[in-house]
């Protein structure tokens, strides 16, 4: 790259480079914050979708031609997983209330736009 020799010629260039690094690290903090927020929102969405799907699956299980003991086994495992998911959601709500409120606001906005 032809620009590399220009960085070492004047002191101004070093100041510009340091200024660039400072702004880069500030933006990096914002990028990390946005990444964590989006990641937690995704995890929350997946977990709540799992809970909804598990309840629907529980209702549909009795329509399948399988034995009652298998239905009880699947229901027991499903209930155990749903309880764990509820605990996880509860932990998220206590640790990150602002993010969860933002997720609920976003969901409400999408629901209004869809109708």
Image (cartoon, rainbow, N blue to C red):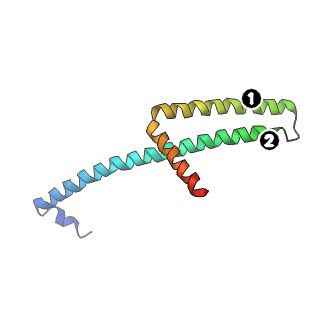
Give the residue drawn at x 56%, y 57%.
Answer: 113
What secondary structure is found at the residue carrying circle 2?
helix
Residues packed near mark 1 inside 10 Å, few (<14), some (14 to 19) or many (20 plus): few
> Which residue is the site of mark 2?
60
Q: Position of residue 52 (x, y in %)?
A: 67, 41
Exactly how many numbered labels are in the figure?
2
Q: CA distance from mark 2 to mark 1?
A: 15 Å
Nearer to us: label 2 or label 1? 2
Give the residue drawn at x 47%, y 47%.
Answer: 38
Q: Is residue 60 left or right of residue 80?
A: right
Give the residue drawn at x 51%, y 49%.
Answer: 106
Q: Which mark is residue 76?
A: 1
Determine whether 98 is above or below 91 in the image: below
**N-terminal label among 2 and 1:** 2
What secondary structure is found at the residue carrying circle 1?
helix
Query: Looking at the rendering, which quadrant does residue 66 occupy?
Result: top right
- Say which quadrant the C terminus sits in: bottom right
Q: Position of residue 77 (x, y in %)?
A: 72, 31
Query: Looking at the rendering, which quadrant does residue 19 occupy?
Result: bottom left
Which of these two is toward me, 30 or 109?
109
Q: Position of residue 74 (x, y in %)?
A: 77, 33
Determine whether 15 is above or below 79 in the image: below
Determine whether 6 is above or below 57 in the image: below
């Amino acid at each position: 790259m032809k620009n590399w020799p220009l960085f070492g010629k004047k002191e101004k260039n070093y100041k510009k480079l340091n200024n660039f690094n400072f702004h880069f690290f500030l933006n990096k903090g914002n990028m990390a914050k946005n990444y964590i927020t989006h990641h937690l929102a995704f995890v929350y969405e997946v977990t709540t979708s799992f809970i909804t799907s598990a309840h629907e699956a529980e209702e549909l299980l009795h329509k399948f031609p399988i034995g009652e003991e298998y239905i009880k086994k699947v229901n027991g495992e499903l209930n155990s997983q749903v309880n764990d998911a509820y605990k996880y959601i509860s932990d998220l709500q206590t640790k990150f209330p602002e993010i969860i409120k933002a997720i609920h606001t976003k969901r409400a906005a999408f629901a209004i736009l869809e109708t």
